[in-house]
Amino acid sequence: MSKVLVIGAGGVGSVAVHKMAQVSLTNPDIFSHITLASRRIVSCEKVAESVKALTGVTIDVAQVDADNVEETVALIQKIQPKLVVNLALPYQDLAIMDACLATKTDYLDTANYEPRDTPKFEYSWQWAYQERFKEAGIMALLGSGFDPGVTSVFASYIKKHLLDTIDTLDILDCNGGDHGQHFATNFNPEINIREVTAPSRHWADGQWVEGPALSHKQTFDFDQVGEKNMYLMYHEELESLAKFYPEIKRIRFWMTFGDAYLKHLEVLQNVGMTRIDPVIYNGQEIIPLQFLKAVLPEPSSLGSTTKGKTNIGDIATGQKDGQQKTVYVYQVCDHEEAYAETGNQAVSYTTGVPAMIGAAMMLTDAWKGEGVFNIEQFDPDPFMDMLNKHGLPWQVKELDAPLDF
Ligand code: NDP
Protein backbone atom coordinates (compact mmCIF):
# COMPACT_ATOMS: atom_id res chain seq x y z
CA MET A 1 0.00 0.00 0.00
CA SER A 2 1.50 3.33 -0.97
CA LYS A 3 -0.85 6.26 -0.67
CA VAL A 4 0.14 9.54 -2.28
CA LEU A 5 -1.10 13.08 -1.63
CA VAL A 6 -0.64 15.48 -4.56
CA ILE A 7 -0.99 19.20 -3.75
CA GLY A 8 -1.74 21.58 -6.66
CA ALA A 9 -4.39 20.91 -9.31
CA GLY A 10 -2.90 23.00 -12.15
CA GLY A 11 -1.57 21.69 -15.46
CA VAL A 12 1.36 19.80 -13.92
CA GLY A 13 -0.71 18.33 -11.06
CA SER A 14 -3.32 17.20 -13.57
CA VAL A 15 -0.78 15.32 -15.74
CA ALA A 16 0.93 13.75 -12.70
CA VAL A 17 -2.36 12.44 -11.33
CA HIS A 18 -3.48 11.08 -14.75
CA LYS A 19 -0.16 9.24 -15.06
CA MET A 20 -0.30 7.92 -11.46
CA ALA A 21 -3.78 6.59 -12.19
CA GLN A 22 -2.53 4.91 -15.39
CA VAL A 23 0.34 3.26 -13.50
CA SER A 24 -1.98 2.10 -10.70
CA LEU A 25 -3.95 0.04 -13.25
CA THR A 26 -1.00 -2.24 -14.00
CA ASN A 27 0.93 -1.75 -10.78
CA PRO A 28 -1.57 -1.16 -7.95
CA ASP A 29 1.15 -1.35 -5.28
CA ILE A 30 2.81 1.89 -6.42
CA PHE A 31 -0.08 4.35 -6.32
CA SER A 32 -2.61 2.35 -4.32
CA HIS A 33 -4.58 5.45 -3.36
CA ILE A 34 -4.35 8.96 -4.85
CA THR A 35 -5.65 12.17 -3.22
CA LEU A 36 -5.45 15.48 -5.09
CA ALA A 37 -5.70 18.62 -2.95
CA SER A 38 -5.61 22.27 -3.99
CA ARG A 39 -6.62 25.76 -2.90
CA ARG A 40 -9.91 25.43 -4.82
CA ILE A 41 -11.81 22.16 -4.63
CA VAL A 42 -13.31 22.84 -8.07
CA SER A 43 -9.82 22.58 -9.66
CA CYS A 44 -9.45 19.11 -8.08
CA GLU A 45 -12.92 17.99 -9.13
CA LYS A 46 -12.24 18.89 -12.76
CA VAL A 47 -9.06 16.78 -12.76
CA ALA A 48 -10.78 13.90 -10.93
CA GLU A 49 -13.55 13.81 -13.57
CA SER A 50 -11.01 13.73 -16.39
CA VAL A 51 -8.97 10.97 -14.65
CA LYS A 52 -12.14 8.91 -14.25
CA ALA A 53 -13.13 9.45 -17.90
CA LEU A 54 -9.66 8.75 -19.36
CA THR A 55 -8.45 5.94 -17.07
CA GLY A 56 -11.48 4.69 -15.13
CA VAL A 57 -9.66 5.32 -11.83
CA THR A 58 -11.39 7.15 -8.97
CA ILE A 59 -9.22 9.57 -7.00
CA ASP A 60 -10.09 11.49 -3.83
CA VAL A 61 -10.10 15.28 -3.69
CA ALA A 62 -9.58 17.74 -0.85
CA GLN A 63 -9.35 21.48 -0.29
CA VAL A 64 -6.19 22.89 1.34
CA ASP A 65 -4.43 26.23 1.59
CA ALA A 66 -0.86 24.96 1.49
CA ASP A 67 0.46 28.32 2.74
CA ASN A 68 -1.10 27.30 6.04
CA VAL A 69 1.09 24.64 7.68
CA GLU A 70 -1.56 23.53 10.22
CA GLU A 71 -4.13 22.96 7.46
CA THR A 72 -1.68 20.81 5.50
CA VAL A 73 -0.64 18.91 8.64
CA ALA A 74 -4.31 18.14 9.38
CA LEU A 75 -4.84 16.90 5.82
CA ILE A 76 -1.72 14.69 5.93
CA GLN A 77 -2.83 13.27 9.30
CA LYS A 78 -6.25 12.48 7.88
CA ILE A 79 -4.99 10.80 4.69
CA GLN A 80 -1.76 9.25 6.06
CA PRO A 81 0.09 9.27 2.71
CA LYS A 82 3.55 7.75 2.32
CA LEU A 83 4.54 10.71 0.14
CA VAL A 84 3.44 14.31 -0.47
CA VAL A 85 3.98 15.49 -4.07
CA ASN A 86 4.05 19.29 -4.15
CA LEU A 87 2.82 20.58 -7.52
CA ALA A 88 1.44 23.88 -6.22
CA LEU A 89 3.58 26.99 -6.69
CA PRO A 90 7.19 27.51 -5.54
CA TYR A 91 5.88 29.90 -2.82
CA GLN A 92 4.39 26.93 -0.95
CA ASP A 93 7.54 24.73 -0.87
CA LEU A 94 8.74 25.57 2.65
CA ALA A 95 5.27 25.47 4.23
CA ILE A 96 4.68 22.01 2.72
CA MET A 97 8.15 20.84 3.81
CA ASP A 98 7.30 22.02 7.35
CA ALA A 99 4.06 20.02 7.25
CA CYS A 100 6.03 16.95 6.07
CA LEU A 101 8.50 17.39 8.94
CA ALA A 102 5.67 17.67 11.48
CA THR A 103 4.07 14.46 10.21
CA LYS A 104 7.30 12.60 9.25
CA THR A 105 6.18 12.20 5.63
CA ASP A 106 8.39 12.10 2.51
CA TYR A 107 8.30 15.11 0.15
CA LEU A 108 8.81 15.75 -3.60
CA ASP A 109 8.61 18.91 -5.74
CA THR A 110 9.44 20.23 -9.23
CA ALA A 111 10.55 23.81 -8.53
CA ASN A 112 12.67 25.47 -5.85
CA TYR A 113 11.24 27.71 -3.13
CA GLU A 114 10.67 31.32 -4.15
CA PRO A 115 10.01 34.20 -1.77
CA ARG A 116 7.09 36.20 -3.17
CA ASP A 117 8.92 39.54 -3.23
CA THR A 118 12.29 38.62 -4.87
CA PRO A 119 12.94 36.25 -7.76
CA LYS A 120 15.89 34.17 -6.56
CA PHE A 121 15.69 30.71 -8.11
CA GLU A 122 18.10 29.21 -5.60
CA TYR A 123 18.13 26.11 -3.41
CA SER A 124 19.56 27.64 -0.21
CA TRP A 125 16.28 27.69 1.73
CA GLN A 126 15.47 24.07 0.92
CA TRP A 127 19.02 22.77 1.40
CA ALA A 128 18.82 24.31 4.89
CA TYR A 129 16.26 21.55 5.77
CA GLN A 130 18.91 18.83 5.27
CA GLU A 131 19.60 18.12 8.98
CA ARG A 132 15.94 18.36 10.04
CA PHE A 133 14.83 15.89 7.35
CA LYS A 134 17.70 13.56 8.27
CA GLU A 135 16.84 13.69 11.97
CA ALA A 136 13.17 13.00 11.20
CA GLY A 137 14.23 9.99 9.08
CA ILE A 138 12.40 11.29 5.99
CA MET A 139 13.41 12.13 2.42
CA ALA A 140 12.85 15.18 0.23
CA LEU A 141 13.43 14.93 -3.53
CA LEU A 142 13.85 18.38 -5.07
CA GLY A 143 13.27 19.27 -8.72
CA SER A 144 11.58 16.19 -10.20
CA GLY A 145 10.12 17.91 -13.29
CA PHE A 146 11.75 18.25 -16.72
CA ASP A 147 14.04 21.19 -16.11
CA PRO A 148 14.94 20.91 -13.32
CA GLY A 149 14.48 17.18 -13.30
CA VAL A 150 15.03 15.13 -16.43
CA THR A 151 17.83 17.46 -17.63
CA SER A 152 19.80 16.67 -14.43
CA VAL A 153 19.05 12.93 -14.79
CA PHE A 154 20.38 13.19 -18.40
CA ALA A 155 23.60 14.67 -16.97
CA SER A 156 23.92 11.75 -14.51
CA TYR A 157 23.24 9.30 -17.35
CA ILE A 158 25.94 10.93 -19.50
CA LYS A 159 28.41 10.69 -16.62
CA LYS A 160 27.49 7.08 -15.84
CA HIS A 161 27.37 5.67 -19.39
CA LEU A 162 28.68 8.03 -22.08
CA LEU A 163 31.66 10.07 -20.82
CA ASP A 164 34.38 9.44 -18.21
CA THR A 165 34.52 13.16 -17.37
CA ILE A 166 32.29 16.07 -18.42
CA ASP A 167 34.01 19.36 -19.30
CA THR A 168 31.06 21.40 -20.58
CA LEU A 169 27.31 20.93 -20.33
CA ASP A 170 24.64 22.90 -22.22
CA ILE A 171 20.94 22.41 -21.50
CA LEU A 172 18.77 23.34 -24.50
CA ASP A 173 15.05 23.87 -23.88
CA CYS A 174 13.01 24.34 -27.04
CA ASN A 175 9.27 24.75 -27.19
CA GLY A 176 8.30 24.65 -30.86
CA GLY A 177 4.59 24.74 -29.98
CA ASP A 178 2.14 27.35 -31.26
CA HIS A 179 -0.97 28.04 -29.13
CA GLY A 180 -2.50 30.57 -31.52
CA GLN A 181 -2.63 33.37 -28.89
CA HIS A 182 -0.86 36.75 -29.20
CA PHE A 183 0.82 36.28 -25.83
CA ALA A 184 0.53 33.48 -23.28
CA THR A 185 2.88 31.44 -21.11
CA ASN A 186 2.96 27.66 -21.07
CA PHE A 187 3.10 27.37 -17.31
CA ASN A 188 2.14 29.65 -14.46
CA PRO A 189 2.65 33.17 -15.99
CA GLU A 190 3.88 34.73 -12.76
CA ILE A 191 6.67 32.17 -12.29
CA ASN A 192 7.46 32.06 -16.02
CA ILE A 193 7.84 35.84 -16.38
CA ARG A 194 9.89 36.13 -13.17
CA GLU A 195 12.25 33.49 -14.58
CA VAL A 196 12.57 34.96 -18.07
CA THR A 197 13.14 38.56 -16.94
CA ALA A 198 15.86 37.65 -14.40
CA PRO A 199 19.51 38.39 -15.38
CA SER A 200 21.22 35.56 -17.27
CA ARG A 201 23.82 33.59 -15.33
CA HIS A 202 26.03 30.63 -16.21
CA TRP A 203 28.75 28.66 -14.45
CA ALA A 204 32.31 29.05 -15.77
CA ASP A 205 35.57 27.96 -14.11
CA GLY A 206 34.18 27.86 -10.60
CA GLN A 207 32.13 31.06 -10.63
CA TRP A 208 28.89 32.60 -11.85
CA VAL A 209 29.04 34.89 -14.88
CA GLU A 210 26.10 37.30 -15.01
CA GLY A 211 24.66 39.31 -17.92
CA PRO A 212 21.48 41.21 -18.81
CA ALA A 213 18.32 39.13 -19.36
CA LEU A 214 17.81 37.74 -22.88
CA SER A 215 20.90 39.48 -24.31
CA HIS A 216 22.82 36.45 -25.67
CA LYS A 217 21.15 34.73 -28.62
CA GLN A 218 22.15 31.67 -30.69
CA THR A 219 20.36 29.73 -33.41
CA PHE A 220 20.09 25.94 -33.14
CA ASP A 221 18.49 23.33 -35.39
CA PHE A 222 16.32 21.15 -33.12
CA ASP A 223 15.39 17.63 -34.22
CA GLN A 224 11.69 17.45 -35.25
CA VAL A 225 11.22 21.19 -34.58
CA GLY A 226 13.71 22.98 -36.85
CA GLU A 227 15.81 26.13 -36.43
CA LYS A 228 14.95 28.31 -33.43
CA ASN A 229 16.51 31.27 -31.66
CA MET A 230 17.52 30.39 -28.12
CA TYR A 231 18.69 32.68 -25.32
CA LEU A 232 21.17 32.21 -22.50
CA MET A 233 19.28 32.20 -19.17
CA TYR A 234 19.69 31.30 -15.55
CA HIS A 235 17.83 28.18 -14.50
CA GLU A 236 17.83 26.57 -11.08
CA GLU A 237 19.37 23.22 -12.03
CA LEU A 238 22.63 25.05 -12.84
CA GLU A 239 23.14 25.56 -9.09
CA SER A 240 22.70 21.91 -8.10
CA LEU A 241 24.65 20.58 -11.11
CA ALA A 242 27.58 22.90 -10.25
CA LYS A 243 27.44 21.59 -6.66
CA PHE A 244 27.16 17.86 -7.42
CA TYR A 245 29.36 17.83 -10.56
CA PRO A 246 32.28 20.11 -9.61
CA GLU A 247 34.35 18.64 -12.51
CA ILE A 248 32.17 20.47 -15.08
CA LYS A 249 33.98 23.65 -16.10
CA ARG A 250 31.09 25.36 -17.88
CA ILE A 251 27.33 24.83 -17.48
CA ARG A 252 24.82 26.89 -19.47
CA PHE A 253 21.06 26.89 -19.98
CA TRP A 254 19.34 28.03 -23.19
CA MET A 255 15.64 28.52 -23.88
CA THR A 256 13.90 29.29 -27.19
CA PHE A 257 11.57 32.27 -27.52
CA GLY A 258 9.72 33.54 -30.58
CA ASP A 259 10.00 37.18 -31.65
CA ALA A 260 6.31 37.89 -30.86
CA TYR A 261 6.71 36.61 -27.26
CA LEU A 262 9.80 38.77 -26.75
CA LYS A 263 8.16 41.87 -28.23
CA HIS A 264 5.13 41.55 -25.92
CA LEU A 265 7.39 40.89 -22.94
CA GLU A 266 9.51 43.95 -23.71
CA VAL A 267 6.45 46.21 -23.85
CA LEU A 268 4.97 44.72 -20.66
CA GLN A 269 8.29 45.24 -18.91
CA ASN A 270 8.67 48.80 -20.21
CA VAL A 271 5.24 49.80 -18.94
CA GLY A 272 5.83 48.20 -15.53
CA MET A 273 3.39 45.29 -15.83
CA THR A 274 6.01 42.68 -14.83
CA ARG A 275 6.87 44.42 -11.52
CA ILE A 276 6.53 42.28 -8.39
CA ASP A 277 6.55 45.17 -5.87
CA PRO A 278 3.16 46.48 -4.72
CA VAL A 279 1.59 49.58 -6.31
CA ILE A 280 -1.50 51.44 -5.09
CA TYR A 281 -4.51 51.19 -7.41
CA ASN A 282 -7.88 52.63 -6.33
CA GLY A 283 -6.62 52.82 -2.76
CA GLN A 284 -5.64 49.16 -2.79
CA GLU A 285 -2.23 47.49 -3.03
CA ILE A 286 -1.81 45.31 -6.12
CA ILE A 287 1.20 43.51 -7.61
CA PRO A 288 1.29 44.32 -11.35
CA LEU A 289 2.57 40.84 -12.35
CA GLN A 290 -0.26 39.18 -10.40
CA PHE A 291 -2.78 41.43 -12.14
CA LEU A 292 -1.19 40.56 -15.50
CA LYS A 293 -1.56 36.85 -14.67
CA ALA A 294 -5.28 37.42 -14.09
CA VAL A 295 -5.79 38.79 -17.64
CA LEU A 296 -3.56 36.31 -19.50
CA PRO A 297 -4.90 32.97 -20.75
CA GLU A 298 -4.75 30.18 -18.14
CA PRO A 299 -1.92 27.86 -19.25
CA SER A 300 -4.29 24.91 -18.80
CA SER A 301 -6.66 26.47 -21.38
CA LEU A 302 -3.97 26.36 -24.11
CA GLY A 303 -3.95 22.57 -24.40
CA SER A 304 -6.71 22.21 -26.96
CA THR A 305 -5.14 24.70 -29.41
CA THR A 306 -1.40 24.04 -29.05
CA LYS A 307 0.30 22.31 -31.98
CA GLY A 308 3.96 21.38 -32.45
CA LYS A 309 6.65 19.78 -30.32
CA THR A 310 9.02 20.42 -27.46
CA ASN A 311 12.64 19.26 -27.64
CA ILE A 312 14.67 19.48 -24.43
CA GLY A 313 18.07 17.95 -23.83
CA ASP A 314 21.71 18.11 -22.72
CA ILE A 315 24.81 18.49 -24.89
CA ALA A 316 27.98 17.47 -23.06
CA THR A 317 31.60 17.50 -24.17
CA GLY A 318 34.20 15.55 -22.24
CA GLN A 319 36.60 12.64 -22.34
CA LYS A 320 35.87 9.01 -23.12
CA ASP A 321 38.76 6.53 -23.06
CA GLY A 322 41.21 9.40 -23.46
CA GLN A 323 39.42 10.94 -26.49
CA GLN A 324 37.30 14.09 -26.64
CA LYS A 325 33.66 13.27 -27.34
CA THR A 326 30.41 15.29 -27.58
CA VAL A 327 27.06 13.65 -26.84
CA TYR A 328 23.48 14.91 -27.02
CA VAL A 329 20.68 13.32 -24.97
CA TYR A 330 17.23 14.76 -25.68
CA GLN A 331 13.51 14.16 -25.57
CA VAL A 332 10.86 15.28 -28.07
CA CYS A 333 7.23 15.60 -26.92
CA ASP A 334 4.19 16.38 -29.11
CA HIS A 335 1.68 18.90 -27.73
CA GLU A 336 -1.36 17.33 -29.41
CA GLU A 337 -0.49 13.79 -28.30
CA ALA A 338 0.03 15.01 -24.72
CA TYR A 339 -3.37 16.70 -24.84
CA ALA A 340 -5.14 13.65 -26.22
CA GLU A 341 -3.72 11.50 -23.41
CA THR A 342 -4.17 13.81 -20.40
CA GLY A 343 -6.04 16.96 -21.45
CA ASN A 344 -2.86 19.07 -21.00
CA GLN A 345 -0.21 20.43 -23.39
CA ALA A 346 3.38 19.22 -23.56
CA VAL A 347 4.92 21.70 -21.08
CA SER A 348 2.65 20.39 -18.31
CA TYR A 349 3.09 16.83 -19.63
CA THR A 350 6.90 16.93 -19.65
CA THR A 351 6.81 18.15 -16.02
CA GLY A 352 3.98 15.96 -14.68
CA VAL A 353 5.38 12.68 -16.02
CA PRO A 354 8.78 13.07 -14.27
CA ALA A 355 6.95 14.09 -11.08
CA MET A 356 5.05 10.78 -11.27
CA ILE A 357 8.29 8.89 -11.99
CA GLY A 358 10.16 10.55 -9.09
CA ALA A 359 7.22 9.59 -6.85
CA ALA A 360 7.41 5.99 -8.12
CA MET A 361 11.18 5.94 -7.42
CA MET A 362 10.49 6.95 -3.81
CA LEU A 363 7.44 4.76 -3.23
CA THR A 364 9.25 1.64 -4.51
CA ASP A 365 12.47 2.49 -2.62
CA ALA A 366 14.41 2.48 -5.91
CA TRP A 367 15.66 5.83 -4.62
CA LYS A 368 15.85 6.20 -0.88
CA GLY A 369 17.66 8.26 1.71
CA GLU A 370 17.24 10.48 4.73
CA GLY A 371 17.63 14.20 4.19
CA VAL A 372 17.17 16.59 1.26
CA PHE A 373 18.31 15.39 -2.18
CA ASN A 374 18.52 16.75 -5.70
CA ILE A 375 17.61 14.39 -8.48
CA GLU A 376 21.16 14.06 -9.91
CA GLN A 377 22.28 12.40 -6.66
CA PHE A 378 20.51 9.13 -7.55
CA ASP A 379 21.09 6.31 -10.05
CA PRO A 380 19.63 7.58 -13.36
CA ASP A 381 18.90 4.12 -14.83
CA PRO A 382 15.51 3.22 -13.29
CA PHE A 383 14.24 6.77 -13.92
CA MET A 384 15.45 6.76 -17.55
CA ASP A 385 13.80 3.39 -18.02
CA MET A 386 10.45 4.73 -16.79
CA LEU A 387 10.73 7.80 -19.07
CA ASN A 388 10.82 5.43 -22.06
CA LYS A 389 7.81 3.47 -20.79
CA HIS A 390 5.58 6.35 -19.70
CA GLY A 391 5.45 8.78 -22.60
CA LEU A 392 8.83 10.57 -22.65
CA PRO A 393 11.16 8.41 -24.78
CA TRP A 394 14.64 9.89 -25.17
CA GLN A 395 17.45 9.62 -27.70
CA VAL A 396 21.24 9.70 -27.63
CA LYS A 397 23.36 11.11 -30.46
CA GLU A 398 27.09 11.57 -30.81
CA LEU A 399 27.93 14.97 -32.35
CA ASP A 400 30.94 15.50 -34.63
CA ALA A 401 32.23 18.46 -32.64
CA PRO A 402 31.55 20.49 -29.47
CA LEU A 403 29.18 23.48 -29.74
CA ASP A 404 31.04 26.32 -31.48
CA PHE A 405 29.49 29.13 -29.40
P1 NDP B 1 -0.59 26.26 -12.26
O1 NDP B 1 -0.63 27.71 -11.92
O2 NDP B 1 -1.33 25.73 -13.44
O3 NDP B 1 -1.09 25.41 -11.00
C1 NDP B 1 -0.70 25.65 -9.71
C2 NDP B 1 -1.75 25.04 -8.80
O4 NDP B 1 -1.35 25.28 -7.45
C3 NDP B 1 -3.13 25.62 -8.99
O5 NDP B 1 -4.02 24.56 -9.21
C4 NDP B 1 -3.43 26.32 -7.67
O6 NDP B 1 -4.65 26.12 -7.08
C5 NDP B 1 -2.49 25.60 -6.71
N1 NDP B 1 -2.16 26.47 -5.59
C6 NDP B 1 -1.67 27.74 -5.64
N2 NDP B 1 -1.53 28.22 -4.39
C7 NDP B 1 -1.95 27.25 -3.55
C8 NDP B 1 -2.06 27.13 -2.15
N3 NDP B 1 -1.71 28.15 -1.35
N4 NDP B 1 -2.52 25.98 -1.63
C9 NDP B 1 -2.90 24.96 -2.42
N5 NDP B 1 -2.82 24.99 -3.76
C10 NDP B 1 -2.34 26.11 -4.31
O7 NDP B 1 0.95 25.87 -12.36
P2 NDP B 1 1.62 24.63 -13.11
O8 NDP B 1 0.79 23.41 -12.90
O9 NDP B 1 1.98 25.03 -14.47
O10 NDP B 1 2.97 24.48 -12.27
C11 NDP B 1 3.01 23.78 -11.03
C12 NDP B 1 4.43 23.78 -10.50
O11 NDP B 1 5.29 23.14 -11.44
C13 NDP B 1 5.01 25.18 -10.27
O12 NDP B 1 5.76 25.16 -9.08
C14 NDP B 1 5.94 25.38 -11.45
O13 NDP B 1 6.99 26.26 -11.15
C15 NDP B 1 6.45 23.96 -11.63
N6 NDP B 1 6.99 23.70 -12.98
C16 NDP B 1 8.16 23.01 -13.07
C17 NDP B 1 8.70 22.73 -14.30
C18 NDP B 1 9.93 21.87 -14.39
O14 NDP B 1 10.26 21.43 -15.51
N7 NDP B 1 10.64 21.57 -13.32
C19 NDP B 1 8.09 23.21 -15.55
C20 NDP B 1 6.78 23.82 -15.36
C21 NDP B 1 6.28 24.08 -14.10
P3 NDP B 1 -6.17 26.34 -7.48
O15 NDP B 1 -6.32 25.99 -8.94
O16 NDP B 1 -6.82 25.30 -6.63
O17 NDP B 1 -6.50 27.73 -7.14
Image (cartoon, helix red, strand yellow):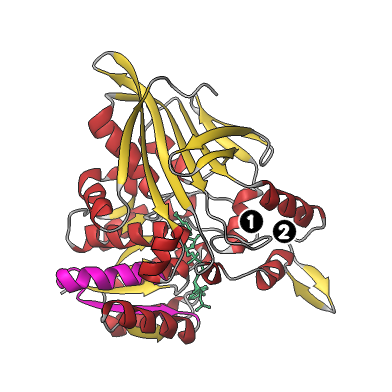
Residue 40: x percent and y percent? 50, 83
Residue that sits furthest to the top in the current view? 322
Q: Could you tell me the amino acid type at mark 2?
A: Thr
The answer to whether any part of residue 309 appears in the image is: yes
The C terminus: image quadrant: top right
Identified at 32% across, 44% down, the residue is 153
Asked if the stretch drawn in magenta spans residue 32, the answer is: yes
Q: Residue at x 52, y 45 (%)?
A: 235
- Confirm if mark 1 falls within 8 A of ligand 1: no
Instruction: Name which quarter of the figure residue 389 lies in.
Output: bottom left
Quadrant occupied by the N terminus: bottom left
Vertical placement of residue 97 versus 385, above or below = below
Callout 1 touching callout 2 (CB < 8 Å): yes
Q: Where is mark 2, residue-wise? A: 274
Going 27% across and 77% down the picture, which residue do you hit? 55
| Camera sees residue 2 | no
Q: From the viewer's side, name the closer residue of 255 and 107.
A: 255
Local crowd size for mark 2, using a 10 Å CA cut-off: few (<14), some (14–19), many (≥20): many
Across and down, in percent, residue 58 comes to 28, 84
Q: Is residue 169 left or right of residue 378?
A: right
Q: In terms of secondary structure, where does tag 2 sit? A: loop
Name the residue beneath numbered marker 1: 193
In this view of the protein, which residue sits in the foreground, 402 or 241?
Answer: 402
Local SS, label 1: helix
| Chain-order first, disc 1 or disc 2 | 1
Q: Which residue is the extreme one toward the right?
A: 282
Q: Where does residue 158 sit, x and y in percent of width and height? A: 30, 33
Asked which quadrant contains residue 366, the reply is bottom left
Amino acid type, mark 1: Ile
- Magenta residues (range): 14-39
Q: Quadrant of residue 394?
A: top left
